[in-house]
Structures are given as C-alpha cells and as structure tokens.
Image (tube, rainbow, N blue to C red):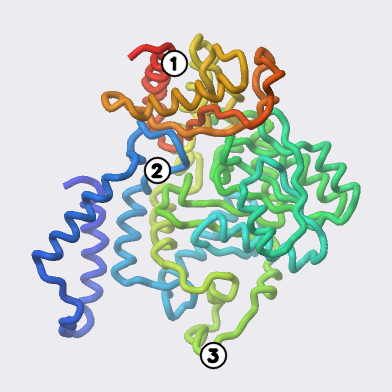
C-alpha cells in the first residue's frame, strides 16, 4: 500500500466511524448501479484519464500544473464523503472553522494585520473579481491601473464590472514600468493600482515596494495579485533562499497592500480550485452584506457566505488546505522547503543556459519560471519558428519526451543581434514552469535533452 492509499484509508476510516454513530438506514434502490455496468464505467473513465499530459512527472515542465500533495488529496476525499458547503455554518461548520484558520495563517504569512478579512474562492479569477469589485465600490468612477505584464483576468473582470482600466507598459524583465505608473498617478483619478507578484508569463515580481510608496503618495489603493508567486513570501526573510534582494523586498512589501490574492492550488499543493482573497480593512465586509430568508440562522458567528460573492463552495477545499498546512506550515522549514527546491531548479537551469551554445536564456528567472530559445536565428520570424519547432519535437519524442510551454513576447525585447527590419508580431519563445521540487534533480537531464534536440541530434 503506497503513501496515498494509507492516507486515504485513515481519513475515510475516520469518517466511516463517525457515520456509524448514527442509526443505520436503508440506501434507496434508485441510487444503485449494476455491478457490471459500474465496472465498465469506471474502466472507461480510467482509460479516458490517460488522455492527459504527465503533470505529475518532472518531464512535464510546461504550464502551472502539478498534482496536489497526497495529504491534500486524502483530506479532500474524506471531506467529500460528507460534502460540506462552506457558504454557511449550517452547511459546513467543521470546514468553515478550518477555512478561517487557513485564511488567518495566509494573512500572517503576508504580514497583514490580525483583523484582515478574507476567504477562500474557487479560483484566482474569482478572487481578483472580488478584489476589483470592492475597489469599484470604494472608489467609484476612478480608474484601475495595471501593467501589461498582468494576468488577462484583470482586463476581463474590469470589463465585467464596467471599470475604466489603464494598461501600463512593462520593462525588459516583465515588471510594470514605474515611470509610467508615476505619470498615471500624477494625472489623477486612479482608484486602485494592481501589482503582480509572480506573473504567469515570466514569473516576474513587480517593484511592489516602490510602487506602494508611489500609490500612497497619490492617494491610490493597492491590490497585489500574488496568485502565482505569493507563497514565496515565506522565503523573503532569508538571504540564503536564493531570491534576489529586491525580490525579497518586494515580497515583504505585500504587507502594505489593501488587498491580496493568492492561489493555494498552485504553490500551496492543493487540488483545483482553491484561491484566496484578503482585505486589510475588515470594514469592507459591509459591502458584501446581504440577507437570506433561510440561511445564517444556526450561529451568530460570521458565515463565510456573508463575505463572499460566491454562494455554494466546496468545504473540501478548506479541509484539504488545512490538513496540508498542518503538515507543511507556512515557514521556511515547512512549505518553504518545497519552494526552495523549485527556486533552486530555476537558478540551476539559468546557469546551464548561460553556458550553452545551443540555447539562450531570455531573462533571469525571478522565481521558478525559466524562459529561453534556440540560438542561431537571424530574425524574429526565424526565432519564432525555431522555438515552436523545438517545442513540438521535444513533446513528440516518444522515447524521451519533454513537455514545455510557449510564451509570446514582444520582438523588441529580444537580443539585439536579430534583424530589426523584420520586427513585427510577438515572437514565440520557450517557457518552463518548475513547480515540482523534483525538478531540482531533473534540470540537468531536461537541459541536456533540449540541447541535443536544438543541435539537431536524435
């Protein structure tokens, strides 16, 4: 029996013991599935699940995908036997309490005040929607400012909320341009500045420390989208964690934000979907206020549905996160050990790229996203084609496949040796997200194989 099976057995056994404390009842026959038919269904289901990339394996270094930790899987499965709903305390009292503990722990990780208001969501998109909705309610008729490096969520949610959104340019390494931000703030009318801690393209961290000061000077609120990189705050107090000093400073400055979003289903080792939104000022809870003729009667305590745009929400997400944080606390020796290995993998691969005659790094990784492209192209169009070709050949190689992702970047950000007469559309380069700690050991192998492919070797 492997580790996951032991964990599942322990959790499911505990839930079954609780169920046995209640008098037995007869399962309704309408719920029965014929044994042979059930086996056929599950066999087909298992077969169809094979139509996936191997997200669990270090060969997969493409998108921001990885399996949840077995602790989270076992806790989630156990909770789903009960199927709690964290909208109201009468739908999930145990998992609602766990959610509040998790939110408090995440707020403390960011250095936010104890009275910080927050809750889990089904995704970072919904978490950002709530943050922008609160921004609109607090500062109506004022615009939102965001960098071109930010996630497309913000443009989409701003459109949904009918907010004026100003997009600012980014610098060479994928951070919002501070001069452009200051110019926008000086013009006035900015209600909220959105900053990113860990962009999904390059993994870049905006200059949050300086940007917060600028926003404060001009009376604007600050929202930090730390969906991807937020958990790296755990390592920001250590000068031996492999993070650049300015990155550490910017991660620490998240404590000054008015609202923050982070996704436990990324670096928090959770199943999809599990996001989290936090607000420094608990008074924003009044904006959520609503009534229901049949909800919120079992307790005078705060129900999570009273501070959320979502209604029904899986309590299993909170249970899985709670169990994971007991096993891996938000400390350098807890979850930080996993993050440290991911960061080491990125640093090591960047060093290999620096010495490679076949592959070239695009920018130095801030966290654990590595970007690169094949050397030797004389034009942006040729580089674009070479990157796409290497991406496809690496994935199609049945004997030794490597799964990467592709990123489109502005051609003017590419090396100066290219023929600038052909600069036009965005150019594809290769992108690798090293979210699994096992990547630390696999980076030399991944790099060597891609070098060989880039040189035309089989």
Residue at disc 1, secondary structure? helix
- Dividing the picture into quarters, in which one does residue 176 lie? top right
The residue that disc 1 covers is 454
Q: Badge 3 is on which residue?
A: 293
- Measured from the top left, where is residue 231 in percent x and y? 54, 45
Residue 239 shows in the view: no
**Marked residue nearer the N-terminal end (1 or 3):** 3
Frontmost residue, 257 versus 359: 359
Give x and y (percent) for residue 430: 51, 28
Task: Depth check: give the residue in front, 257 or 417.
Answer: 417
Disc 1 and disc 3 in contact, CB within 8 angstroms:
no
Position of 40 relative to 350 (above/below):
below
Q: Residue at x 60, y 47 (%)?
A: 226
- In space, the residues marked 1 and 3 are separated at their CA atoms by 65 Å
Give neighbour class at mark 2: few <14, some 14-19, many 20+ (Cα, 10 Å): many
The furthest residue to the left: 36
The residue under the point 36% across, 40% down is: 55
Relative side of 315 to 166, left or right:
left
Residue at 49% of width from left, 12% of height from top? 358
Marks 2,1: beta carbons within 8 A? no
């Amino acid at each position: 029996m492997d580790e996951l099976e032991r964990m599942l057995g322990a959790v499911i056994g505990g839930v079954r013991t609780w169920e046995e404390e209640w008098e037995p009842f007869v399962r309704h026959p309408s719920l029965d599935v014929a044994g042979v038919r059930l086996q056929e269904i599950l066999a087909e289901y298992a077969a169809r699940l094979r139509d996936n990339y191997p997200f669990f394996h270090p060969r997969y270094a493409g998108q921001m995908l990885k399996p949840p930790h077995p602790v989270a899987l076992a806790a989630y499965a156990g909770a789903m036997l009960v199927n709690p709903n964290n909208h109201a305390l009468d739908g999930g009292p145990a998992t609602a309490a766990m959610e509040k503990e998790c939110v408090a722990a995440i707020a403390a990780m960011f250095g936010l005040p104890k009275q910080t208001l927050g809750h889990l969501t089904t995704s970072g998109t919904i978490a950002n929607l709530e943050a922008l909705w609160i921004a609109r309610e607090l500062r109506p008729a004022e615009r939102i400012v965001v960098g071109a490096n930010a996630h497309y969520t913000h443009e989409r949610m701003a459109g949904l909320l009918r907010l004026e959104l100003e997009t600012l340019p980014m610098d060479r390494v994928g951070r919002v341009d501070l001069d452009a931000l200051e110019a926008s703030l000086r013009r006035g009318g900015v209600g909220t500045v959105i900053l990113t801690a860990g962009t999904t393209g390059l993994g870049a961290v905006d200059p949050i420390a300086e940007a917060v000061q600028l926003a404060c000077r001009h009376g604007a609120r600050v929202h930090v989208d730390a969906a991807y990189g937020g958990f790296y705050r755990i390592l920001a107090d250590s000068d031996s964690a492999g993070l650049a000093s300015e990155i550490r400073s910017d991660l620490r400055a998240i404590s000054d934000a008015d609202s923050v979003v982070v996704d436990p289903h990324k670096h928090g080792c959770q199943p999809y979907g599990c996001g989290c939104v936090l607000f420094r000022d608990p008074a924003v809870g009044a904006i959520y206020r609503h009534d229901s003729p049949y909800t919120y009667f079992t307790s005078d305590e705060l129900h999570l549905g009273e501070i959320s745009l979502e209604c029904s929400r899986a309590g299993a997400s909170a249970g899985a996160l709670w169990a994971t944080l007991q096993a891996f606390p938000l400390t350098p020796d807890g979850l930080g050990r996993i993050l440290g290995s991911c960061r080491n993998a990125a640093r090591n691969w960047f060093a290999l790229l620096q010495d490679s005659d076949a592959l070239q790094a695009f920018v130095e990784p801030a966290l654990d996203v590595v970007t690169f492209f094949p050397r030797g192209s004389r034009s942006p169009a040729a580089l674009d084609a070479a990157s796409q070709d290497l991406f496809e050949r690496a994935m199609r190689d049945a004997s030794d496949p490597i799964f990467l992702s592709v990123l489109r970047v502005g051609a003017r950000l590419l090396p100066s040796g290219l023929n600038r007469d052909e600069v036009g559309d965005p150019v594809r380069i290769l992108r690798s997200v090293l979210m699994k700690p096992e990547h630390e050991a696999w980076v030399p192998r991944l790099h060597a194989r891609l070098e060989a492919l880039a040189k035309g070797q089989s």
